[in-house]
């Protein structure tokens, strides 16, 4: 369902941070993370508070670069600074080389034990199913010593093949330490911590009339779409950085072509945002993430007011300086960095 967007005041942000710190400290203690206990606000370097009114959430980054995302009443994403599957700088790749001392079945046991320590049942995270395992990869003759263990609900797959219910754990194949843990399943929801601060509502739930043909969608009002834009722009900037896209970051509202900005709400699929930059680049946002990017000079995409006939085939003629394997390597790198 649509949700109200609140104004994140300093008082509200501080209240959320204080309320979720015990949860983060408890999470770190159960996973035996190398962080002094108890974790307190004095160890926080950055905090991004969620603007959603329907539940309490936010991302905490500690001074040692360990990060924790709190949502749906619990820590749902943990990343250590040594997480290969959170890597944003390809120049650090050599840091992840190492001997593979942990066997595959041991990595699965480590991941499952950690999730059990956090209090989750087999039913909540589908731990009774056979996990998908990505083994350590070889690069330049060396092993990237990381396993990725994933449990997916086979009944919760989007038409495009994207898992909607997923639990993922990254295990260091040399030490057995957990470097990343993510929980994406509504069945694992916990009660929100109680807050005494009530922030002002920035945008109410949209109540526009339905439009469209086969799929009925709500075209949300301006106040709501502006508030949503402010909320997702940091994610767009993060997508650009991780994917290695040639665009100035951070993206701000001034960089957006507001005349062609589209925001819709559909009952079963949620928000669909089509975002055009003034440069002509396009981003499509859905299911809580950027799902598509098209550059202004893409052969398959034309910016608003630039019909396809303005892009003759000759525009794309040129020498082929990249092999198919090199192109595939670039794609894999971008996908890996996007997590």
Image (cartoon, rainbow, N blue to C red):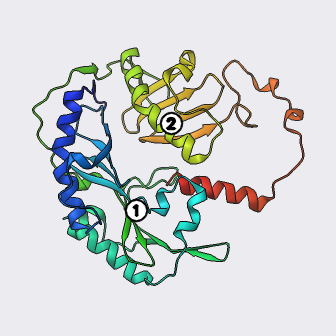
Secondary structure under tag 2 reads: helix
Query: In the rendered view, would you say 215 is above or below 184?
Result: above
Give the number of the disc on residue 154.
1
Q: Quadrant of residue 325?
A: bottom right
Is 258 in front, or is 142?
A: 142
Residue drawn at (55%, 73%) of the image: 97
Q: Quadrant of residue 225?
A: top left
Secondary structure under tag 1 reads: loop
Query: In the rendered view, would you say 4 is above or below 155?
Result: above
1 vs 2, front mark: 2
Q: Earlier in the sequence, mark 1 or mark 2?
A: 1
List x then y, in percent, for residue 208.
36, 17
List x then y, in percent, for residue 142.
62, 76
- The answer to whether residue 184 is visible is no
Is 210 in front, or is 262?
A: 262
List x then y, in percent, for residue 259.
56, 15
List x then y, in percent, for residue 54.
23, 34
Q: Quadrant of residue 330?
A: bottom right
Query: In the rendered view, would you say 265 is above or below 181?
Result: above
Label total for image = 2
Pointers 1 and 2 in contact (C-beta within 8 Å): no
Give the number of the disc on residue 135.
none
55 horizontally vs 87: left or right: left
- The answer to whether residue 311 is visible is yes
Query: In the rendered view, would you say 254 is above or below 45?
Result: above
Is 73 in front, or is 218?
A: 73
Q: CA distance from mark 1 to mark 2?
A: 29 Å
Badge 2: few (under 14), some or many (20 or more) residues near its Cα, within 10 Å?
many
162 horizontally vs 9: left or right: right
Give the number of the disc on residue 236.
2
5 horizontally vs 229: left or right: left
Residue drawn at (23%, 54%) of the image: 24
């Amino acid at each position: 369902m649509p949700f109200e967007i609140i104004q994140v005041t300093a008082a509200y942000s501080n209240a959320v941070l204080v309320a979720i710190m015990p949860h983060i400290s408890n999470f770190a203690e159960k996973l035996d993370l190398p962080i002094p206990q108890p974790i307190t606000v004095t160890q926080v370097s950055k905090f991004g508070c969620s603007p959603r009114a329907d539940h309490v959430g936010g991302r905490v980054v500690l001074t040692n670069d360990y990060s924790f995302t709190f949502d749906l009443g619990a820590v749902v994403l943990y990343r250590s600074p040594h997480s290969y599957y959170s890597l944003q700088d390809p120049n650090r790749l050599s840091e992840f080389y190492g001997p593979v001392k942990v066997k595959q079945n041991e990595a699965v046991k480590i991941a499952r034990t950690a999730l059990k320590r956090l209090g989750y049942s087999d039913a909540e995270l589908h731990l009774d199913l056979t996990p998908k395992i990505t083994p350590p990869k070889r690069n330049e003759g060396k092993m990237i010593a990381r396993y990725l263990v994933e449990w997916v609900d086979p009944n919760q797959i989007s038409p495009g093949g994207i898992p909607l219910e997923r639990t993922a754990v990254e295990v260091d194949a040399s030490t057995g330490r957990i470097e990343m843990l993510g929980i994406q399943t509504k069945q694992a929801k916990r009660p929100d911590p109680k807050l005494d601060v009530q922030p002002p509502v920035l945008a109410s739930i949209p109540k526009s009339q339905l439009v469209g043909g086969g799929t009925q969608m709500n075209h949300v009002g301006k106040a709501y779409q502006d508030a949503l834009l402010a909320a997702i722009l940091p994610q767009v900037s993060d997508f650009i950085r991780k994917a290695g896209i040639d665009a100035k970051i951070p993206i701000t509202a001034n960089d957006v072509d507001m005349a062609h900005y589209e925001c819709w709400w559909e009952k079963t699929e949620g928000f669909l945002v089509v975002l055009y930059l003034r440069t002509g680049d396009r981003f499509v946002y859905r299911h809580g993430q950027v799902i598509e990017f098209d550059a202004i000079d893409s052969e398959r995409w034309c910016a608003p007011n630039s019909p396809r006939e303005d892009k003759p085939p000759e525009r794309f003629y040129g020498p082929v300086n990249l092999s198919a394997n090199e192109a595939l390597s670039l794609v894999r790198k971008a996908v890996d960095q996007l997590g």
